């Protein structure tokens, strides 16, 4: 996998994270939204470990 | 990508699993500094420990610097528990309401250590197991049977969720007895299984003797992941299991406080890969604490979980002993290999029936039961493939009329404090050996080879 591809994946992960964080904060008083967004963020961390940490490390900005 | 004859889909994450070793070390140091900083900022326990040692996150700039960070021992974790925030104490790095999982160690080496995890940590547990199961050939097409009593011990919980994450179909074999489990494996044509070596052999024995089923011929399990005992890294035991089941048997190593940090891959290189994506594992000389990097020299395993956040595991003194292998693995992973798996412990704690036991824990029980004499003897043997533990005790002459009640209390306390069942032998008072200097009350007569 080339570094550009890795960076692209990282950008998508950051995009999902931003969206999930916003959803978690603006849950409209619906626990089902707040807690499921929290779970998405927990799972997303595994993508960060597997991709983003490596992207930042292998392709320093 | 085909560096080793293995395609990239042979790895859970081919990028990190095949990084050059020097790059892996760099990544680990970077991640170590991050978790160290996290613990330093969030936990009074860790900050106190590090301030007393005069070290802070900015001091970590190299792999060697990591060794300057004080080790954490299990006893230290026990000491802070049952305090605020209850019940974990001040090593907790997240608000209590973010803790979603409770597990504890077996307590056989003393008081159990509590382990809080957030949902992110729980995802991380299954991620670590996903690396290992994928390396052992688990795929979406597998139907995985887990003959495990799901309880407060972490054991195969994470294996269950990791298999799900990979896409396997998971069959929880929870409270079924051994015969029912074997029949369910047969009925569902399960292809993989996870259990302790003792139980893997015990199941095969039960299948043959009680059900007339030959697991190798009549069942479809073709890979077995072991944990809890060193058996799957002991060649003769591994061979027995593989022959009994007609399956590949793979080892893995982990601990409640640490995570699943090492695994055998399908190449079976005669050792376990350390998962260097998620853990930083160092071997240190038992006497001097000197870092051991060269193969062939045994040292104590000191380990850091690089991404675990609720109760971080930083430079945990595992008490396990190992040595690095000199040979690269044909699987192409650059994760280092500990030769022959974990080869022992740096103290006298031993594993019986998959449970860690300290003779001192048994002594404590025996001596807490009124009516028992001071002397006792523990003898561990192998009956067939199973561990057998005999506890010899004496009843005080004045208590002989209460023998039944005394033995009932003894058995209850032993099961409660050590999680093991014993064969109890009552010997005439004053007949067991008496010692003047170093007592030899624990005899382990098992032979692994």
Image (cartoon, rainbow, N blue to C red):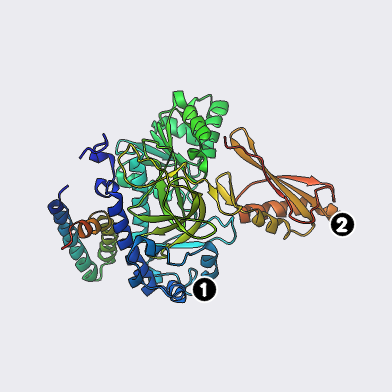
Q: Residues within 10 Å of mark 1 (few under 14, many from 20)?
A: few
Residue B179 in sight from this viewpoint: no
Q: Nearer the viewer, mark 2 or mark 1?
A: 1
Q: Residue B423: where, in percent of width, then height?
A: 70, 43
Q: Kindly identify which chain the residue marked by label 1 belongs to.
A: B
Examine the image and state in which quarter residue B208 appears.
top right
Tell me, for residue B83, which label it has, or none.
Answer: 1
Above or below, B157 against B1 in this view is: below
What residue appears at the point 54 percent right and 48 percent down from the top-left corner? B344
Mark 2 residue element: helix
- The residue that mark 2 highlights is B398
- In what quadrant of the picture does the C terminus of chain B appear? top right
Q: Kindly identify which chain the residue marked by label 2 belongs to.
A: B
Residue B87 in sight from this viewpoint: yes
Going by the image, does A50 lie left or right of A6?
right
Q: Nearer the viewer, residue A21 or B128?
A: B128
Going by the image, does B416 lie left or right of B271?
right
Going by the image, does B289 lie left or right of B372?
left
Examine the image and state in which quarter residue A56 appears.
bottom left
């Amino acid at each position: 996998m080339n570094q550009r591809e890795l960076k692209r994946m990282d950008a998508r992960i950051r995009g999902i994270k931003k969206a999930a964080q916003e959803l978690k904060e603006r849950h409209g008083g619906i626990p089902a939204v707040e807690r499921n967004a929290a779970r998405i963020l927990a799972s997303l961390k595994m993508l960060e470990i597997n991709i983003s940490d490596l992207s930042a490390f292998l392709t320093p900005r | 990508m085909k560096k080793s004859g293995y395609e990239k889909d042979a790895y859970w994450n081919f990028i990190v699993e095949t990084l050059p070793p020097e790059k892996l070390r760099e990544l680990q140091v970077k991640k170590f500094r991050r978790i160290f900083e996290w613990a330093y900022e969030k936990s009074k326990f860790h900050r106190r420990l590090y301030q007393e040692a005069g070290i802070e996150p900015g001091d970590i700039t190299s792999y060697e610097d990591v060794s300057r960070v004080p080790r954490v021992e299990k006893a230290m974790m026990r000491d802070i528990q049952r305090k605020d925030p209850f019940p974990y104490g001040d090593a907790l790095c997240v608000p209590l309401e973010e803790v979603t999982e409770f597990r504890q160690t077996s307590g056989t080496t003393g008081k159990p250590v509590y382990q809080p995890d957030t949902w992110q940590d729980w995802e991380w547990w299954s991620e670590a197991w996903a690396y290992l199961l994928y390396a052992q050939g688990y795929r979406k097409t597998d139907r995985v049977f887990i003959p495990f009593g799901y309880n407060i011990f972490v054991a195969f919980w994470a294996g269950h969720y990791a298999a799900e994450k990979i896409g396997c179909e998971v069959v929880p074999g929870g409270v079924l007895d051994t015969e029912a489990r074997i029949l369910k494996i047969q009925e569902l044509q399960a292809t993989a299984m996870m259990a302790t070596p003792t139980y893997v052999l015990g199941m095969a024995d039960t299948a043959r003797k009680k059900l007339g089923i030959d697991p190798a011929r009549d069942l479809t399990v073709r890979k077995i992941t072991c944990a809890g005992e060193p058996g799957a890294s002991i060649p003769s035991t591994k061979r027995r299991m593989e022959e009994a089941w007609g399956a590949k048997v793979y080892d893995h190593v982990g601990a409640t406080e640490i995570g699943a940090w090492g695994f055998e891959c399908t190449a079976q290189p005669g050792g376990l890969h350390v998962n260097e994506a998620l853990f930083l594992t160092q071997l240190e000389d038992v006497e001097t604490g000197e870092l051991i990097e060269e193969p062939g020299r045994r040292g104590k395993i000191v380990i850091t979980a690089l991404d675990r956040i609720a109760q971080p595991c930083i430079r945990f003194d595992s008490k396990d002993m190992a040595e690095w292998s000199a040979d690269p693995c044909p699987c192409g992973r650059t994760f280092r290999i500990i030769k022959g798996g974990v080869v022992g412990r740096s103290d006298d704690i031993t594993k019986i029936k998959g449970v860690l036991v300290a003779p001192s824990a048994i002594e404590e029980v025996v001596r807490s039961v009124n009516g028992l004499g001071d002397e006792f003897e523990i003898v561990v043997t192998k009956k067939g493939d199973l561990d057998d533990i005999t506890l010899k005790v004496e009843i005080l002459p004045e208590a002989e009329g209460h023998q039944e009640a005394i033995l009932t209390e003894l058995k209850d306390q032993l099961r409660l404090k050590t999680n093991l069942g014993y064969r109890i032998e009552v010997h005439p008072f004053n007949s067991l050996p008496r010692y003047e200097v170093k007592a030899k009350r624990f005899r382990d007569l098992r032979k692994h080879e």
